Image (cartoon, rainbow, N blue to C red):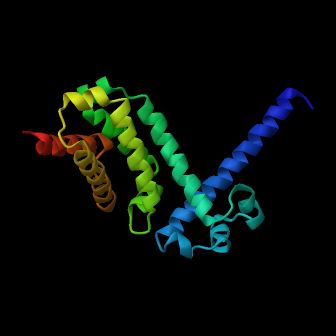
Amino acid sequence: MSMNEMKSRNEATDRRIRKTRAALKKSLTTLMQQKSVKDISVKELTEMADVNRGTFYLHYKDVFDLLEQSENDLLDELHQLIDHISGDTVKNDPAFLFEKVYLLCEENVDLVHILLGENGDIKFLNNLNTFLKEKCLNDWSPFIRQAELKYFDAFFSFLVGGCCSLLQYWFSNGMRQTPRELAMITVEFLNRNTAE
């Protein structure tokens, strides 16, 4: 077998794996709109995704593992997105950061809506909170110091909680605003609440 044939075969396999995982994630989010993850069986998940149970177990240990890997994939995307945003960018155009985050949420609307909803996973929110806090304290610390935030922990909690609530509002109202418009609303709210 030639190198090109092997490469084509590997690409076809990778495509099938991505398609299978995408189908399982979509089925998971659909089922989580109806019930808690603890009440979802592998049987109903695989039937909905039209995937063999054996195939499911090639990729995941159980439904909780599928949820955790889905959350980790989303957090990885967020890491990659935010890692390229400097403190200067945040300082000069804070809406840019929020717009990028909201764009990512729009691209993953089903999963994000579930994770922030009543059947969501508190562990995901805690991981998100920890990541964003570390980013603020490490990479953006000069900007944070310049803003002279007296109560950083309280402000940070307000910021993350407010953004999550704003996302829930956006989802439940048909996502009428663009991510940029939602980002501008976020910045407007922050400016009102941080003004002396």
Is residue 106 visible to us here?
Answer: no
Give the image location of residue 60, x and y in percent: 68, 58
For residue 96, above or below residue 114: above
Give the image location of residue 63, x and y in percent: 61, 65
Q: Quadrant of the N terminus?
A: top right
The residue positioned farthest toward the top in the image shown: 88
- Name the image quarter holding residue 25: bottom right
Camera-nearest residue between 149 and 73: 149
Residue at position x 20%, y 27% from top? 146
Question: In the visual, does 151 lie left or right of 7?
Answer: left
Looking at the rendered structure, the number of numbered marks drawn on it comes to 0
Camera-nearest residue between 165 and 175: 165
Residue at position x 76%, y 42% from top? 12
The residue positioned farthest toward the left in the image shown: 196
For residue 124, above or below residue 99: below
- Name the image quarter holding residue 144: top left
